[in-house]
Image (cartoon, grey):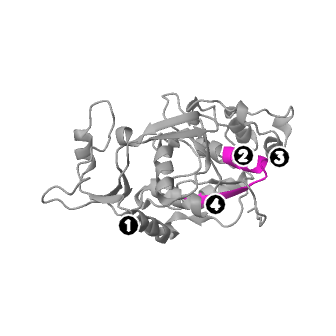
Amino acid sequence: MHTSTDKTLYRGRFAPSPTGPLHFGSLVAALGSYLDARHNRGEWLVRVEDLDPPREVAGAADSILHTLEAFGLEWDGPVVYQSMRNGLYDTALEQLARNGKLYGCACTRKEIADSSIKGQGTIYPGTCRNGLPAGRTARSVRVRVDDTCIRITDRLQGIVEQRLADEVGDFVLRRADQLVAYQLAVVIDDAEQGITDVVRGADLLDSTPRQYYLQQQLGLPAPRYLHLPIAVNASREKLGKQTHAGAVQPDAGNRILIAALTFLQQALPDDAAMAGQAELLQWATVHWNVDALPRKRLQPAPEIPSA
């Protein structure tokens, strides 16, 4: 673990969910956020997003951390676990409730899907916004949105605009199983940890306006965002547990790092194949080039080297 006590103008983070071992797509996100932080002489934190026990795999968090260390991606300070931070999330919910921004919702996912206009996704229709239907009890807690257009400038993907009322609707902050929703937890954690820059996969780009809205409602600063292309298989499906993506193998040497840097279209030293892992990371940090990153949301994954 890298340790640093110096204050910095840049603080980044990698926040994996422990739903399985680190696969190539997750390594790309970790590497991109690490290089952006270190290139800017910033801190790089690791936060385990373990708020969804039904989806978690026993031992996955430790496996991910060990894999990061094996690839030389050393973080600053202690690892933070979201499961230990429920008090912070409860305080934020109380603030929003005092401001009249929350209400209980009795709707099930099926009811919302059935009431959505075909082809427009599951936009919440506001069924419980002005009170629960007769005979129903609240299952989840939603936040009220307005009809303003959220506009965010991503460092790579450019301008992102979303009118939450039309494209999402009031969204859930506490789920029916009483777990805190990702959208709230990530906003609170980034603010509490002083994160200035979020570098992550483009699969989360459409979530960013909701997070920006919560930052506004809670009076929290908004970090800068950079959404990297996500690695997809031949069927254009995101690499992950659902698509049976294999774990990256650190004992494949620096070949996986080379594959990840190539995926991100970063220049490589002439002797990359012969360079040691630490040497390659140092070179990549110095030569990190955001302008060279592919400006797309999806990109085919390369053939992943094995040991």
Residue 235 at what x, y percent from top left? 48, 28
Residue at the spot of label 3? 282
Residue 201 at what x, y percent from top left? 57, 42
Residue at the spot of label 1? 98
Between disc 2 and disc 3, the foreground one is: 2
Q: CA distance from mark 4 to mark 1?
A: 25 Å
Residue at the spot of label 2? 36
Between disc 1 and disc 3, the foreground one is: 1
Residue at the spot of label 4? 194
Indicate whether 163 appears above or below 97: above
Q: Residue at x 23, y 56 (%)?
A: 106
Q: Residue at x 66, y 67 (%)?
A: 78
Residue 124 at what x, y percent from top left? 30, 44
Q: Are marks 4 and 1 in contact (CB under 8 Å)?
A: no
Q: CA distance from mark 3 to mark 4?
A: 25 Å
Question: Toward the viewer: 121 or 279?
Answer: 121
Task: For mark 2, give the secondary structure.
Answer: helix
Residue 50 at what x, y percent from top left? 50, 61
Callout 2 environment at 10 Å: few (<14), some (14 to 19), or many (20+)? Answer: many
Task: For mark 4, give the secondary structure.
Answer: loop
Between disc 2 and disc 4, the foreground one is: 4
Kind of residue sitting beneath label 1: Arg
Answer yes or no: is residue 64 visible: yes
Callout 4 environment at 10 Å: few (<14), some (14 to 19), or many (20+)? Answer: some
Position of 39 compared to 21: left or right?
right
Task: For mark 3, give the secondary structure.
Answer: helix
Position of 113 compared to 23: left or right?
left
